[in-house]
Amino acid sequence: MLKGLQSTTTLHNGVKMPLVGLGVFKVQDGEEVVNSVKSALETGYRSIDTAAVYGNEEGVGKAIAESNVAREELFITTKVWNADHGYEETLAAFDVSLRKLGLDYLDLYLIHWPLPSQGKYIETWKALEELYKNGRVRAIGVSNFKIHHLEDIIANCEIKPMVNQVEYHPRFNQRELHAFCQKHAIQLEAWSPLMQGGLFEEPVIVEIAQKYNKSAAQVIIRWDIQTGVVTIPKSAKPHRIAENADVFDFELSQEDMDKINSLNTDQRMFADPDDFNRV
Ligand code: NAD
C-alpha cells in the first residue's frame, strides 16, 4: 500500500473518512469502472465516490465484491439524484443504490444538488437523517450546497451534514464556504479537484511541480490535503490512479501554498447550484 494513503479526517460524528479517494464520474459501467476501482483498491485506496446518476454503481459493487479488501476498511459514497428528491423517493433511491452496489450499508450518502426549482432538499435531508438513525449509512452529507442552503438545513433539521462535496480547485477555492464549513465542523470535499485537467499547464503549478519533482496533478492534490479538504481525483488509468495517491512524501511550503492560493479567480467551471435544475 502506498505510504499515507490510509490517512483520514474525522467527521463530526467520529467516523473516519480517507483524505484521498477515487472519483468515478464518466467512467463507464462494466469493465472500465471495474478495472479502475480494482486498480485503486490494489494501490491502497479505500474511498470510492460514485453517484446514482453516473450509472456505474453496479460496476463499483462488482469490483468491491471481487477484491479481498474487508468491508469495514472501505469508505463508499454515493448520491441521491435530482429526480429522486422528496422523503419517500429518497428512501427508495437509497435502496436501489445499495442493491446495485451489492452492499448492506453505505459509508456516506449525499444529496447531489440542492435543486432550488423543486424546493425539496429539506424533505430529502430528513430521509437521509432517517437512514442514518437506522444505521443504514455511517455518515450523511450534501453536495453543491452554498452557505444559504446549509443555513437552511441547520435551522430546520436535527443533524448537521457531515460533508459538503463541492467544486474546488486552485481557480475556485471557495474561501467563504470553506470558512463556514470549518465553523460548523462540516468537512469540505473537492470535486473536479484537477479542474478536469485544465491546470496542468498553469505556469505557477508547473514551476512548483518541478521544484518538488512531482507532477502538476500531485501538487494540486497535495494542496487540497494541506488546505484541509478531502479530495477525489478521477482517472481510469492505473498509472495515474497510483500517481494521484502518491502525495504523502512531500509537503508544500507556506510560500508555495500562497502562490497556489493566488491562482483563485472565484470562477466556477460548472453551474452555480442556485441555477442548476436538471432532473
Ligand atoms: P478531475 O478534476 O478529477 O479530473 C479528472 C481528469 O483529469 C481525468 O479524466 C484525466 O483526464 C485527468 N487526470 C487525472 N489524473 C491525472 C494525472 N495524474 N495526470 C494527468 N491527467 C490526469 O475531474 P472529475 O472527474 O470531474 O472530478 C473528480 C470526481 O469528483 C468525479 O469523478 C466525481 O466522483 C466527483 N464529482 C462530483 C460532482 C458533484 O456534483 N458532486 C461533480 C463532478 C465530479
Image: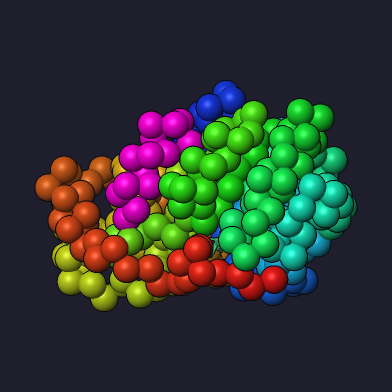
Task: Count the numbered circles shown.
Answer: 0
The residue nearer to you, when weighing 177 against 56, is: 177
- In magenta segment, residue 181: yes
Q: Measured from the top left, where is residue 148 in percent x and y?
A: 46, 48
Q: Is residue 75 left or right of residue 190?
A: right
In which quadrant of the rendered view does residue 212 lie? Answer: bottom left
Position of the N terminus by quadrant: top right
Q: Measured from the top left, where is residue 73 in percent x and y?
A: 67, 35
| Predominant SS along the magenta part | helix
Position of the C terminus by quadrant: bottom right
Q: Is residue 203 left or right of residue 45?
A: left
> Vertically, is 155 above or below 146?
above
Q: Measured from the top left, where is residue 17 in percent x and y?
A: 55, 37
Q: Residue furthest top?
A: 14
Residue at (49%, 40%) from the top-left corner? 151
Residue at (40%, 57%) from the top-left corner? 168
> Vertically, is 211 above or below 255?
below
Residue at (38%, 47%) from the top-left corner? 177
Q: Residue furthest left?
A: 255
- In magenta segment, residue 211: no
Range drawn in magenta: 173-187
Q: Measured from the top left, where is residue 118 in percent x and y?
A: 67, 62
Q: From this viewpoint, is residue 211 visible? A: yes
Q: From this viewpoint, is residue 233 visible? A: no
> Vertically, is 255 above or below 206?
above
Q: Give the image's coloring scheme.
A: rainbow
> Vertically, is 250 above or below 268?
above
The residue nearer to you, when weighing 106 against 110, is: 110
Residue at (21%, 63%) from the top-left corner? 263
